[in-house]
Amino acid sequence: MSVASRRGPKPKLGVGVTAVAVIFALCVALWATVLTGDKTLIGGDILYQYKPWASQPDAHQPRNTYVGDPVTQFVPWLGLVKDSLREGELPLWNPHSLSGTPLLANDQSSPFSPFTLFAALFPPARGISLTMLLKLWVAGIGMALFIKVHGARTLACVVGGIAYATGSFMIVWLAYPHTSVAALAPWLFATLAWYLRDRRPLALVGFAVAVALQFFAGHAETSLHVGFGLAIYLVVRVIALREQRVKAFAAICGAGVLGCLLAGVQLLPFLENLPRSSIMEDRERGNAGASHLPRNALTTWVAPNGRGSPGIDGSADRIPVYPESVGYVGAGAFVAAGFGIWRIRRKRTWEKGALVAVGVLCGAVVYGPLSSLAGSSPLLSVSNNSRFLVVLIFVVAALAGLGLDDALAAAAPARRSLRLPRAGALALSGLALLGLGATVFIMFEWPHDLRDLLPTFRDYLGFWVLAGLLAVVGAVALIAARRLGANETAVGAGFVAIALLEAALFAFPYNPRVPPSEVFPPSSTMAWLGENARGGYVASLGLDLIPDLSVAYRLNDVRGVDTLINRRIRQYWAEGDPKYEDGFLYTILGTPDSRWLAAAGVTHMLTSDKTVVPGTSPVYTERDVVVSEVPGARPFAFAAPSTVAVSNVRQAAAEMIKDPLGPVAVEVPEGADPPPATSAPASVALGYHRPQTIGLRVDGATPSTIVVLQTYTPGWVARVDGKEVPVRAADILFQSIDVPAGSHQVTLRYEPASVKYGLVATALGLLLTVGLSALAVRRAGRAPARPAVPGEQEDANLSES
């Protein structure tokens, strides 16, 4: 008997098309103002919490305080990517933050991601907003395809897709690169499952492309978590095969390697930059890999806003914070997933078993039992492993789709004796749907009054608990109605309705709708700095001026926000400021010495509450904001009046402690020539300064050491009149070049070898992919699909009781 005949008739394709059309129409209605450009999903209004913007007439409380990173990081980086692409260059370097820092190699700028390239077609804030909506569709369609590969009904695929796309990981990280990876995760699983089902070479091509795209998406930690989940799934599925296990496993691993090769232009620069940063040692020291969520976070699978929502009522006091602690795909989907697990011995045993294995292991890491083991494992020891939630959410959403398909197939024969209980179950589900619809209406009409509508139970808000219980009751009643013989399409449509209503409750309100004019809000102080501080660097105490916003205003800041902060930056500022910190990736100054500021080229210092850094002079005041000038600030490029040779960064720090503005400490490798002794400093003129290229005109009667105040990073190549010369570290953090006497043209260009090798790897990967695709298409045209091996596919497990 065929698989199809065992399952009984399936709903017509038109039912699925109608469901997708309804979802699309609702999305257009809900996010219409974003699609038209009247609003963005970027919370630029969070800047009103900080002094340069707080004094503006339109300042107000931000709609969601948890979504600040996109406006301070991803929008500015997208602007840099657009600028470089417009100039016909790769976006390799960010000259505006951290005295200059790698851009492509920080991974999260993700310039080659299709999501980034799509966003680059629009103004940055609008582009990222539209990309956020695109991610929802990519994630949902990918999940629907994964479920469809297992032969599920269309409505089951639709419910699974909605559950994953509007699940907590996608929604709370929607503007972040985390979800650029998460949106592609179902495509990885779908192409893998397709290959295991049909052994089509074209499926391997799809898998390789999916691997490459998720690396291009720009979040290595999420790629790591998805990769671990995928590996567990693959091992269990391969064990289930009765033949050609080694061949299948090798083919999939080969496709994975091909995907890494395709992503070489992004992977290699990131891997080269990672060891120079401080994040690995910081996480190792803090035992980050052993962290996990508390057990009470399990309640969020039914009531994600049970203790309030930062996007609705401003709740921001949850520990751990809201984005980290919420696991949710919809309470109705959660019930369907439970039904699918209950039916695991009857249908798709190995397919669902592989998902359950992934879910159990990832859940044990997220909620504690295996967190210590993960914390002592390679790679995972330096990862935030509570974010294995992305894999757990994928598993539950997939099991929800498969479980609903099981429920739709598990109908009793139509009998008169079942009419009354069947009608009762349908009536109960209808009442639950009406109640859930009422909660949606109330949430839209009175969002700020939800805390007071119903009593609170042990810190859980009655309104949100009721919403979760209504979804559970509706889902259970629909499954019961179907088992009593209710119409398959009606039950499936009921689940679609529950999924959509829960999405409206959870997904729609979280990301704020902000006028484009508030990304970025106007500020008189920032306008003044733009006119008066473009020749040097700026800085501020604490977060008076958020690091990295300089990028948006095209100012230069010695501070910044980045995952990969160069160790030299920490070394320099730890010596020049005893209260310096960057533990949360924001470089924060507390009590900087004005001489160290001047040595770094800082011309203007922003402070608040009339606080002035000793040694600086106020030159601009606006209410609670003070901008002071730093005396003696060094220019961006200059000839060192005197130098001292050191062999490492520690010796350089010891020399600078004596006098930050004294002789420039140049690190000289063993056996290399020392910096030239300068009797008369040369004159240095800055000809041009583009992100990856600097041009200088140097005139001197004697040899000189030219210092450039940007971060010393391997990959910068210096040429004097076209002849390459070494670039050496100077004063811990900066760059220096030896220039002979006379008049010379000096250029510096960022040309890291990892980018060259990465381009070669990507080009080779493209050639192999095109060749494999051509071979796969030829074979697909000549041969039918490989028949399933008994016991290997789901039809061996479809027998009904």
Image: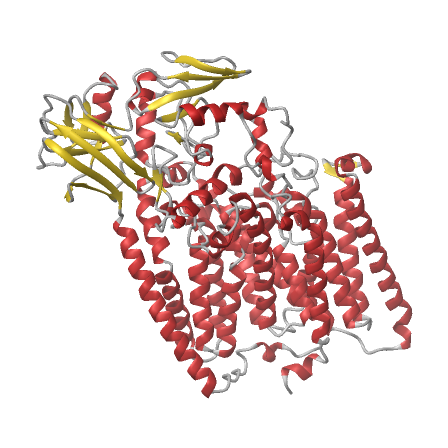
Q: Is residue 590 visible?
A: yes
Q: Is residue 649 above or below residue 177?
A: above
Q: Nearer the viewer, residue 276 or 424?
A: 276
Q: Along the horizontal axis of the image, is 31 left or right of 201?
A: right
Relative height, residue 680 to residue 314 (above, below): above
Left or right: 545 in relation to 106:
right
- As drawn, 302 above or below 711: below
| Quarter of the image where one finds residue 718 | top left
Residue at 80% from the left image edge and 43% from the top image edge: 442
Q: Nearer the viewer, residue 766 or 371?
A: 766
Tell me residue 564's x, y (percent).
38, 40
If the image is split into quadrants, where does the N terminus sit?
bottom right
Q: Is residue 32 left or right of residue 562?
A: right
Count of number-bearing discs: 0
Residue at image position (69%, 42%) is: 305
Q: Residue at x 61, y 57 (%)?
A: 164
Q: Is residue 728 left or right of residue 50?
A: left
Foreground of the two, 534 or 90: 534
Q: Residue 449, position in %: x, y?
A: 78, 35
Q: How is the image coloured?
A: secondary structure
Residue 544 visible at all: no
Q: Position of residue 426 (x, y in %)?
A: 85, 64
Residue 355 percent coordinates (x, y): 56, 63
Residue 297, image quadrant: top right
Between residue 705 and residue 609, name the one nearer to us.
Answer: 705
Q: Which quarter of the figure has residue 521?
A: top right
